[in-house]
Amino acid sequence: MAYAVIRVRGSVGVKRDIADTLKMLRLHKVNHCVIVPENEHYIGMVKKVKDFVTYGEIDNETFEKLILKRGRLAGNNRVSEEIVKESTDLSVSEFAEKVMAGEIKLKDTEVKPVFRLHPPRKGYDKEGIKRPFSVGGALGYRAGKINDLIIKMM
């Protein structure tokens, strides 16, 4: 299983250790998304920056759509099924499953590890980006609801 981590808040007023952690996660700008494996190192990093990001478990179907719609190669070229087939000898769905299982890393392929998303259509939830998801905001852990947010942002 893998987590999708989306940066929600900007860089003004961010403490240095949190800014460094966001850099390590490759979340340099708002609305950037990365896929991280489920291990204690990444989970610790994500929990440290929970007040600036939202995260949850991404499913295979949403990850396939994310690769095809927002995935980029070097030179800002789009990812297509043919390119994935040429570089990995796998279909997009098989490629997504292997990345989710941790057998393949995005940085080992030609696909860039950061997905640049749009702001969500119809906005975040009613409380905005300053409150945690548990009280109606947009920050922190949101489990499987991350898939709905990613679809709103594609």
Image (spheres, rainbow, N blue to C red):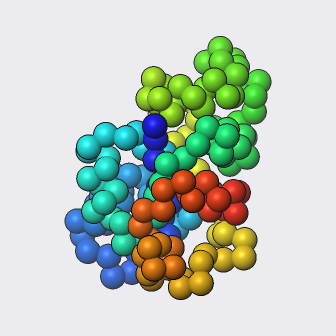
Image spot of residue 146 (x, y percent):
56, 57
Residue 104 position, x and y percent, is 48, 25
Residue appearing at x 47%, y 72% in the figure: 133
Q: Based on the displayed image, in which of its 4 quarters is residue 52 positioned?
A: bottom left
- Direction top: furthest residue: 89
Q: Residue at x 34, y 56 (%)?
A: 46
The image quadrant of residue 68 is top right
Residue at the image position 72 percent from the left and 71 percent from the top: 121
Q: Answer left or right for 4 relative to 11.
A: right
**In front of the other: 148 or 20:** 148
Visible residue check, residue 84: no
Judging depth in this view, the residue of 94 and 10 nearest the camera is: 94
Residue 1 % position (x, y): 46, 37
Side (left or right) of 103 relative to 79: left
Residue 50 x, y percent position in the rendering = 36, 66
Q: Is residue 59 left or right of residue 22?
A: right
Q: How many marks?
A: 0
The quadrant the C terminus occupies is bottom right
Is the residue 61 above or below the residue 16 in the image?
A: above
Is residue 62 shown to the viewer in this render? Answer: yes
The residue under the point 37% across, 41% down is 38
In this view, the residue farthest toward the left is 17
